[in-house]
Amino acid sequence: MAETHTFQTEAKQLLQLMIHSLYSSREIFLRELISNANDAIDKLRFRALEDGSLLEDGGGEFYIDITVDQEAKTLTVYDNGIGMTEADVISHLGTIAKSGTAEFLEKLTGDQKKDASLIGQFGVGFYSAYIVADEVTVLTRAAGTDQGVRWVSKGEDAYTVEAADDLPRGTSVILHLKSDAEEFLDDFRLQSVVRKYSDHIAVPVRMLQDVANDSEPAAEAEADDEDKTPEQELQAVNSAKALWTRSRSDVSDDEYKEFYKHVAHDFEDPLAWSHNRVEGKLEYTSLLYVPKRAPFDLWNRDASRGLKLYVQRVFIMDEAEQFLPLYLRFIKGVVDSSDLPLNVSREILQQDDRVTTIKNALTKRVLTTLEGLAKNDPEEFAAFSNEFGEVIKEGVGEDPANKETVAGLLRFASTKADGEAKTVSLADYIDRMVEGQEKIYFLTADSYANAAGSPHLEQLKAKDIEVLLLFDRVDEWLMSHLTEFDGKSFQDVARAGLELPGDEGNEDEEEAGDDPLADRLKAVLSEQVDEVKKSSRLTDSPACLVLGQFDMGAQMRAIMAASGQSMPESKPVFEYNAEHPLIQRLDSEADEDRFADLATLLFDQAALAEGRALKDASGYVGRINRLLLELLSD
Ligand code: ADP
């Protein structure tokens, strides 16, 4: 008896989206099904290392067969891989287990083009069958079990599952093609698509091919031709050699790109790749890809990451995350080692010195690939920075050995670049430092607008000194790790101790002396500020807030708070611009209440300019309104 189940909500949504937004590149369904079939074979090959009985009678011969039935209008992809039990079928084909799926689906817009690329970031998969099929049947029997399963669905709300007998080991996916997808019944069309998507796969992908019958005398054959269909048998249509085992010069760019789509389940071409064989004390081959776009779950702690690990061509595991550092978690690809044991486990990988050596080498490879991209194709690199710049920043803290290289890959917005696009490298910055400049100046804020409009920039702009504008949420953390680049130290322009080229006696060593205005201000603002000082930073603004050199900034405080550690807030220094008319007017204010009101207003405004939240926002509004009323009643 067939049991009816409904799809998990997310699965249903994804299925519908898939059908609508990928319509224009629908042949990719075949790539996805062949990929799944190949993975299923890889899994069985691996499991059979421990338990040979899983191979049943078929021995170790593996294949993927693609057949069509012209009358029934079906296309079948069969693999003699690991197969699925009933429970597998329900959980793998009826639900989507990736965390963050619901959030991902919310981002979809209904705009086909945009959604298609978003779906690419998510991974396309089995449901892509419904781009071309109005009904899909899956017949499958898990290796080592007797009972087969039949799964059928039209890809709407529900699917049915029932027992099926006499199935061969593995999985058949039978697509009943939509009437406008019958081109995939055409032998010629099908073969070209299959070749395109399966040439790099190590398993033979077979299709029915005519066999030439040489033993038949030519004359007889001619006489019979009318009513005899040529004999056919299943023959491999691909070269069935794993792509990374071939030499670089034998692999075309298109093949590299296709292979990327297979390993990464991505929809778009990769941005760059690096394919290398290493011989010597350790022998391994790696093929690493830089994707064009960040996966939807880049920031999800338990998102899948890592390379496909092979040992002597045998697939061992997906997502071997031990071969790359966390900040390169977006890199996809394959590592094939000749030295690791076939029964290697994740636990072993974690402690193995060989793995550490490979990891260090692969890290360098990726960084070199990115440096090459930055040098040869700045535009592509800008796109890369846009997608992955924030993750790369983690490397500055995470990877001390490559800190300088990683820092060299970072790109920033700056007072000498247009808008908020991050395009300036530290090397660019150093190249155009003004005469006498020793330090790299930067400012962190919570948005580009708050950085670009900060009063702290006034004096630097006046002196034509460039300031890097940092507004990613990790930037304060980044700058606590990045203290030097190319021998130059960094200086936060919003902190105490700002020295500018050409400054002799700088503000921190300003002559001590009476400053009655500072004393008056301090008396009013003592709760909020640590000190009050005459400023040399400002040209246009009346006042600003300056953090102590080692005080924790707002971003770091938020990071600490998120991890449950609340930090006492350090009070800033209030600096005023003695030349500013507002300050001069304040200085001459005799009414102490009014002085206090105005001083508090100036403090609040300085805080707002930093992007800080006001402690007493309604007090601020009240004061402003009193002033506005005075102004209007004049
Ligand atoms: P993904 O491959 O990204 O996990 P899919 O939607 O393509 O997502 O497939 C979901 C799951 O269904 C796979 O992870 C696998 O466990 C199972 N599956 C799909 N096709 C096959 C197959 N031919 N043989 C065995 N299992 C399969």
Image (tube, helix red, strand yellow):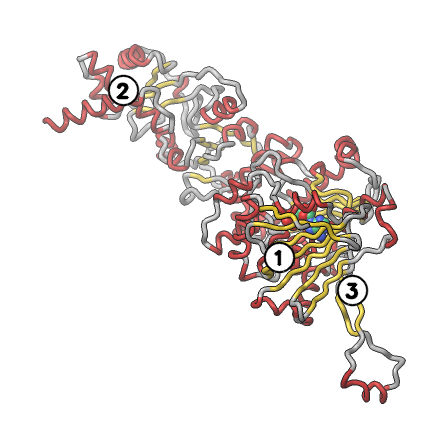
Mark 3 or mark 1: which comes first in sequence?
1
Q: Residue at x 58, y 38 (%)?
A: 99
Amino acid type at image mark 1: Ala
Looking at numbered disc 2 in the image, what kind of residue is underneath it? Answer: Gly
Per the model, the C-alpha gap separating discs 1 and 2 is: 62 Å
Residue that label 2 marks: 619
**Secondary structure found at label 1:** helix
Whole-percent x, y for residue 175 in the image: 65, 60
Element at label 3:
strand
> Circle 1 sits on which residue?
129
Picture layout, residue 303 above or below residue 209:
above
Mark 1, ligand 1, within 8 Å: the answer is no
SS at circle 2:
helix
Of the two numbered discs 1 and 2 in the rendering, the one whose residue sits closer to the viewer: 1
Give above or below for 204 relative to 483. below
Q: Report whether residue 435 is seen.
A: no
The residue mark sitting in front, 3 or 1, is 1
Residue 444 on image: x %, y %: 45, 31
- According to the picture, the residue beneath numbered tag 3 turns out to be 236
Foreground tag (3 vs 2): 3
Q: In the image shown, does 624 or 274 lie closer to the viewer? A: 624
Residue for point 88% across, 85% down: 217
